[in-house]
Structures are given as structure tokens and as C-alpha cells.
Amino acid sequence: MYNERKDMFTIKDVFLQVLFVVLFVFLLIWLFPTKSFVTEKVDNLADSIGNINGNYLTTFNENIKSMKEAAQSYFTTARLPQKVGEIKTLTLQKMLDEKLILPFVDGKGEQCNAQKSYVEITKMDDEYILKVYLSCEDNTDYVLVHMGCYDYCDTYLCEKKEVPKPTTTKPTTPKPTTPKPTTPKPTTPIVNKKYKYEYVLITNGKWGDYSNWTNWSKNKVTANDYTQVETKVVNELVGYKDVYTQTSTRTVTNTSYDYKNKETTYTTVNGTPITQQVVQRSNAYPVVTTKNDNPIKTTERVYGNPLTETSTSYTTTTSVLTSTSTVKYKVVSSKEIMDCSSTCKKVTQYQYKVTKTTYKCPVSYNSSGSGSSMKCYKDVQTYKCPVGYNSSGSGSSMKCTKKVTTYKCPVGFDSSGSGSSMKCTNTTTQYSCPVGYNSSGSGSSTKCTKTVTNYSCPSGYSESGNICYKPVYTTSTEPVYGYVKQPVYSNVTYYRSRTRKFINGTKTVKWSNSDNDQTLLKAGYSLTGNKEEI
């Protein structure tokens, strides 16, 4: 058997076996690539994803920054919230409608949500918190900006800068104050995000060529082994500030005065005569007359005592009787007897002497009350003359007379007072002129005149003491000052970058919570610029 098989093993068989082994090895290499080949493929894929995510992040940050800058110029003093806790909101849609910002898209070229995206500013105790919220298809996030009126602001309101705190401070004792109660609206909490940073160590490789430069952007880019950065400084408009300067001119009226002496004129002045009353006196003379008057009728009430009648009787009873004002009970005797009207028992039986008294008024008298309180009365009419009168007759036929003396003044005299005290006077009027006046005529026709020297100002002039003056108006032009909005320019740094890849080699990736990990840096690791929120 062995010899037969050895004879059949030819060169062709050997060639086929070698070819089979080569094909098998090639198939293994194709199915299971080497470690360096896999590493290079993974590195290229990671770089591509990093570039895409970087572009998305750059676009998103640029859009948020545009919204923030538009909001800072929009929220002027009149539009700011006034009370602590008050919030004012400005949507992205309203910013677009009012042309505060140009339309923008996200990293994928899609429009961001203009209704959900907004900017809101909240009034705090001593500053404002500006929240910029952007909602896009590829990303949704927000930033918080502290704003206030600081001494380094070029405008009324600007973004807060981080100022290093002094190492030493002088202790002060704050004055006690009474806090004013406020009820602020809930504000968006400030969240401090934490990140971890990517480091890479590449060995046994070489650098490839740099890519094309990116567009210029305000987003800061840090140079590293993978990234080359160029910067340029552009002086551009960053806001406006109020500057007090000349804004226009106005016409001003100036006043001076022209002075003159008073002019002298003479006029005749009429005066009012002075009247003087001359009084003549005389005695009044008496006139005696008889005066009649009716008698005074009066009604008098006359009271009388009531008449009494008394009767006496006797009564026997077991009851105790009590006397009244008209009936008097007096016990004459008493004894005990047996009373069996209901239940037989001993009772006391009294014998009383009863004395009854009745009251009545005399004839022609009226009565009021009863018993011992009865009153008897009648009304009687009487007549009498007034005081000073003499009477004649009686009753209703009585006559009343008296002698009356009156006083009169002589004809032409006026009377004052009455009776014997009457005064009689006759008044006549005499006319005379005041001192300095000349008189003409007599009696009520008396005329009084005098010549008066007058000092007056010319027409159009006013007087001040002995001087006449008139205002003279002239016009001039003077500048008008006010606050105007002046543009503020500042140097803004723009960045552009280009990247390169490390070809072949072995890449070792490590993450750290610090963006300046000295241990990794000293070991040869480089910061890639990638970070993830913890």
C-alpha cells in the first residue's frame, strides 16, 4: 500500500497544496484585519464625527450669541422689569418680526423653533439675569448672563465681568436696616455644569496635511497638536452710550430797557364839598288823653274739703282682716272652734268691729280721686282792670280807664326817644370845600376845584418811582444740549482654525475632570478639545 501511494504523489499535488495554504492565509487577513489597520479606521471615523459635532456646536453657539446681543440692545430702561422677581420675555419669533435679528438655521440647515426659543430677563436685588434659550432640532440649551449698571459699562446696562476680589478688606459694621418684604417670582436656577475632558497619546505615527481654514468666528478656539489657530482683531460696533452734547440750536429773546424821565402836565381837579350838620334842639310838649281798655278776665280754681260719713257694723270670721283707708277692722274678741268643713281641725274665730268711711264733695264742686285722696274743686271767673287803670262797674260790665300823657315835638323837628325823655332836633346842612380847594356857588350848588401838577410816563413806558422804562427785545441763537446715542466700538477678536490628522500609529485615549491635568500632559498626552458633561 505504502509504495503504491508514494508513486502517486506528484509535483502537481504539491503545487495545489501550497496554493491552498496561500489562499487560506489571505482569507484570514481579509476577514481579521491587523490592530494598526483597525486603529486607523477608528481614528478617521472619530475625527469625522468630531468635526461634524464641532460644526454643529459652533453654529449653535453663534445663534445663541446673536440672540443675546439682540436682547441686550432691545431691553432698554423702559423695557426692563421694575420690581424684584418680575420677568420680561422676548420670543425668537418677535425678534424676527421686529427685525432685531436675521433668520438663522442649525447645524443641519434646519430652522430653529421660533416659538419655543426665547430670551427672558429677571429683576434681581442689585442686577438682572438674562436667560437665552434656543430650541433647535439638533440641540436645545440655554445660557445665563448676569447684567447690571456697573462702573465699567459704556451703556446703561452691560454684561457683568469677573472682577478679582481684593486680598484684604477693611471690616465695616453695616447699619441695621429693616428688610422690605418682597415676593419675587420664581426665577430660573443657575446651574453650574461640570465636564470631563479628553486627552490622547499617539505613538508610532505621523501627521497628515492640514485641512482648509474654517470661516472667521467670534467663538474662541484653542490651538493644540491637532488644531492650528489664526486670529484677527476687528474694531466693530458693540453698543451705544448716552453722551451729553450739543443737539441743536434755539432762538433766545434778550430783554434790555430804555429809561426816560416823567413828563409834567397840569389838570383841574374837582373836589367834593364837605358837608357839616348844624343841629337845633327843642323840648317836647305833653299831650294828655283818656285811654279805655277791657278788664282782664281770669278763671281761678277753688278747692274744698270732701264731706265724710261713717257707719259701724260687726262681723265674725276665721280669716285675718286688714284695714284700708276707708274700712277699719278692729278685733273685739276671739275663740278657738272646731272646723270640720274639709278636715276637722281647730281654728281661731275672730269678731271684728267694722267702721266704714265714705267721701263726697259739697254741692257745685267737682271731685277727682276717691277715698281719703278725693279732691273737691270748682272754677270761679273774676274780672279786674290792668295795672294803672281805674275800674267802674263789676263783673262782665266792668269799665277800665286811665289818663295818658304823650309828648310831641314842634313842627319841623325830628323826635328821638319817648315819653318825658323825648328829644327834639332840627338839622340843617352847611357846605364847605376841603383845604386847598377853591369854592364857587353856595349850599348844595357849592363847587370845589384846584389845579394839580401831574407827572406821567410817555406812551408805551411803565413807571418805577420817578423813572419811566420800556423793555426792548432782541433775539440771539444759543446751542441746545442733550443726551444722544453714540455708537461704541471695541476690538473684537475673531478666530479661524484648521485641523490635521495623525496617520497610523497607536492612539490611547484618557478622560480627566481637569482641562489642565499635569500628570497626563507630562506623560505626553494632548488635550483634544472634546468634552462631555458629567
Image: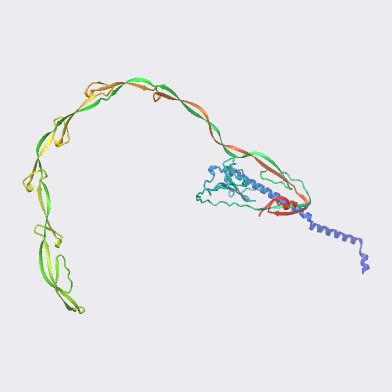
* Quadrant in which the N terminus is drawn: bottom right
* Quadrant in which the C terminus is drawn: bottom right
Q: 396 or 506: which is nearer to us?
A: 396
Residue at 17% across / 77% down in the picture?
336
- Position of 68 with respect to 4 (left or right) is left
Q: In this view, does 454 lie above or below 95?
A: above
Q: 286 or 117: which is nearer to us?
A: 286
Q: 506 or 516: which is nearer to us?
A: 516
- Position of 101 with respect to 32 (left or right) is left
Q: Is residue 180 above or below residue 487?
A: below
Instruction: Tally the marks.
Output: 0
Asked whether the viewer can see residue 298, the reply is: yes
Q: Quadrant of residue 440?
A: top left
Give the x, y percent position of residue 358: 12, 64
Asked whether the viewer can see residue 460, the reply is: no
Q: Which colour assignment does the render follow?
A: rainbow
Give the x, y percent position of residue 310: 10, 66
Q: In which quarter of the image is residue 322?
A: bottom left
Q: Is residue 389 above or below residue 509?
A: above
Give the x, y percent position of residue 319: 18, 73
Give the x, y percent position of residue 492: 65, 41
